[in-house]
Amino acid sequence: MHKEAPYYLFSIDLEDIRLRMDNGAQYKERVPVMIEAYLKFLNTYQAKASFFVVGDMAEKYPTLIKSIEDEGHEIGCHSYRHHTIDTLSPEEFKIDTEKNLEALQKAGIKNIYGYRAPVFSIIEKTAWVYPILKSMGFTYSSSVLPAANPLFGWPEFGKIPRQVDGVLEIPMSIQPFGIRSLPFGGGVYFRMLPAFFIKSLFKKYYKNNNAILGYFHPYDIDVEQEKFMHPGIHDSKLFNFLMYYNRGSVFQKLEMLMDLGVQLCTHIEYIQKQNFVSQVQKIELHKWDA
């Protein structure tokens, strides 16, 4: 592997969109088989990733969540019921996060470093979350999209990790496209963009030795999922089309990137290797006790 290859902070937001729907139980259960597909890919390359887990997933699949940690991957928090930050008061956010931690603890997870807000919903007006995260022992957050976006975005945040009230925020990697900047390293954007273009962007980062933050969901690789209107997208037919678009391309593109020598790693590995420790109160594993 090329010694100057950039880090690709590969992460999975482990959630089940069926649980956000009134009639979701009528659709097939797909999360476990999709997670196993991700784990197979990671094992093939002896790579590790960060899994940000919703609390109800830890309650529903405790054995699966524990097995992910046992394979050496990082487990982080992704809220208890996948409510975006703007829908919660500070007290409600703290309770929600405590329930997320408790669910992970009951699944056998002891050590938690990081938090990711649903839909990257930390923006300037919800930055009150950082003192709460710090008080709960979190080392970092990965919850900001530093660009304008139809859902949530914080353009003024900036592109590089920085401390906010004692918590290191690692924002999404973005690339300008005309008047907008898009997080090309994961999710729907990774599926939308042609492989040659993604390859050129990664080569650019490769040349400058910059890290790229990527994020995926179980559904991003699910070519067999039933068709329905996804929750949280305001019943937009366009957004719903994009939710299904080009899912079959993900692993092909990831394998292409691995051929470039990109180094997959967890968020906390990156923090340690880049010596971001000095920017946070401490780097010890957060051990939460109910």
Image (cartoon, helix red, strand yellow):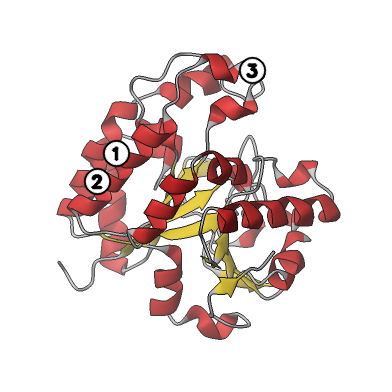
The one of 252 and 193 positioned closer to us in this rendering: 252
Which residue is painted at 33% across and 23% down in the image? 223
Q: Give above or below for 169 relative to 80.
A: below
Q: Are marks 2 and 3 in contact (CB under 8 Å)?
A: no
Whether residue 140 appears in this view of the structure is yes
Estimate the spatial distance between the alpha carbons at disc 3 and disc 1, rounded to whole Å.
29 Å
Estimate the spatial distance between the alpha carbons at disc 1 and disc 2, rounded to whole Å.
6 Å
> Which element type, helix, strand or loop, lies under badge 2?
helix
Q: Quadrant of residue 288?
A: bottom right
**In-image side of 270 versus 250 (left or right):** right
Q: Which residue is mark 2?
A: 41
Which residue is painted at 43% across and 78% down in the image? 272
Residue 25: give x, y in percent of width and height. 56, 19
Query: Mark 3 or mark 2, which is nearer the start of the sequence?
Result: 2
**Which of the two marks, 3 or 1, is nearer to us in this view?**
1
Q: Which residue is mark 1?
A: 37
Q: Are marks 1 and 2 in contact (CB under 8 Å)?
A: yes
> Is the residue marked by circle 2 packed among few (<14), some (14-19), or many (20+) residues within 10 Å?
some
> Which element type, helix, strand or loop, lies under badge 3?
loop
> Which element type, helix, strand or loop, lies under badge 1?
helix
The one of 267 and 94 positioned closer to us in this rendering: 94
- At label 3, the amino acid type is Asp
> Is the residue marked by circle 3 packed among few (<14), some (14-19), or many (20+) residues within 10 Å?
few
Which residue is painted at 66% across and 68% down in the image? 289
